[in-house]
Image: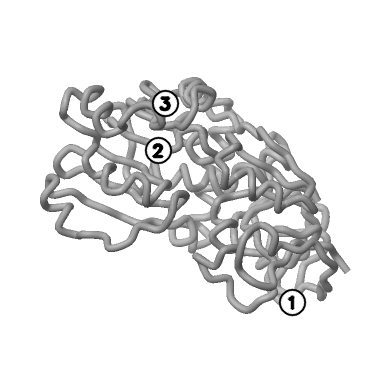
Amino acid sequence: MVRAIRIHEHGGPEVMRFEDVSLAAPAAGEAHVRNTAVGLNYIDVYHRTGLYPVGPLPAVIGMEGAGVVEAVGPGVEGLSPGDRVAYANPIGAYATERLIPADRLVKLPDAIADQTAAAMMLQGMTAEYLLRRTFKVGPETVMLFHAAAGGVGLIACQWARHLGATIIGTAGSEDKVALAREAGCTHVINYRREKFVERVREITSGKGCDVVYDGIGKDTYPGSLECLKPFGLWVSFGNASGKIENFDLGLLAAKGSLFATRPTLFTYTAKRADLVASASALFDVVASGKVKISVNQTYPLSEAATAHRDLEARATTGSTVLLP
């Protein structure tokens, strides 16, 4: 028996139960991993509430973790018991031990600690594809990143600074404004005190941004579109404030022949080669010190409900790790 957080129904944090679950021997292509650290991400909230389907209930939620390989199933090559590994998919991370397809695991370099890995795999690889593949950020880029003091935001802003971009960030308190500025934002807008659309126009002298990275959703739409220059790209990669309803395609024409995309990490890392390349790029920028991972909160895995409440209240900054 292992211990895991499972949901038997969708709802608030109270639906999560810390309970015993059985674990079979790894099947062909699988690995048995003992988690040493588990990452907390907003997608976990979406799975808990049912916004994103998780399949049959009860289900173990959680997308990301780091740990040690305990055993491998038939046909698994390149992994052995004792290997340190990390992952960001598939669901099932909120557990002391789990089974996972071996091709979704990446080996951890010695320079990356377990808690760091658990805090950065999903958020860091998200930052990687956003900045290097969805829109290729460089020294000429003027970008807006919402929730710049959040988990993805702090990583992305540091990485974008390394790439030479001009970064406008938004944050919801003076403490978070300071964190975003420290992470490399050229300008930071406190959206509780200022209207971000007006401030972006002022900062860019009315020209707008090349790209807007929007993980907020309902509260920032359609304002994010107002922040783009003609032919700019709106990247909607999350729904922290709620799902966008009734998206009007005509707004893209009216506001300057804009482009829009709704990417996911799971598409960008669906191929094994892409997963390894994304993780390797992340490991490199973290090991070099160009991107620092801030594990600002830790909770026992058994207190995952408290962690969810704090996350939804926007009371967390940087990354959060659950400890089995």
* Amino acid at circle 1: Ala
Mark toward the start of the polypeptide (1 vs 2): 1
Residue 196 screen position, x and y as percent: 31, 32
* Amino acid at circle 2: His
| Dots 1, 2 in contact, CB < 8 A | no
Compared across the picture, whether 145 is left or right of 252 comes to right
Label 2 vs label 3: CA separation? 15 Å
Q: Residues within 10 Å of mark 3 (few under 14, many from 20)?
A: many
Residue 273 screen position, x and y as percent: 50, 57
Residue identifier under label 2:
146
Q: Is residue 167 above or below residue 264?
A: above
The residue lying at 69 percent from left, 74 percent from top is 58
Q: Residues within 10 Å of mark 1 (few under 14, many from 20)?
A: some
Compared across the picture, whether 250 is left or right of 147 comes to left
Compared across the picture, whether 210 is left or right of 17 comes to left
Choose mark 2 or mark 3, whichever is in front: 2
The residue lying at 56 percent from left, 63 percent from top is 49
SS under mark 1 = loop
Residue 27: give its label: 1
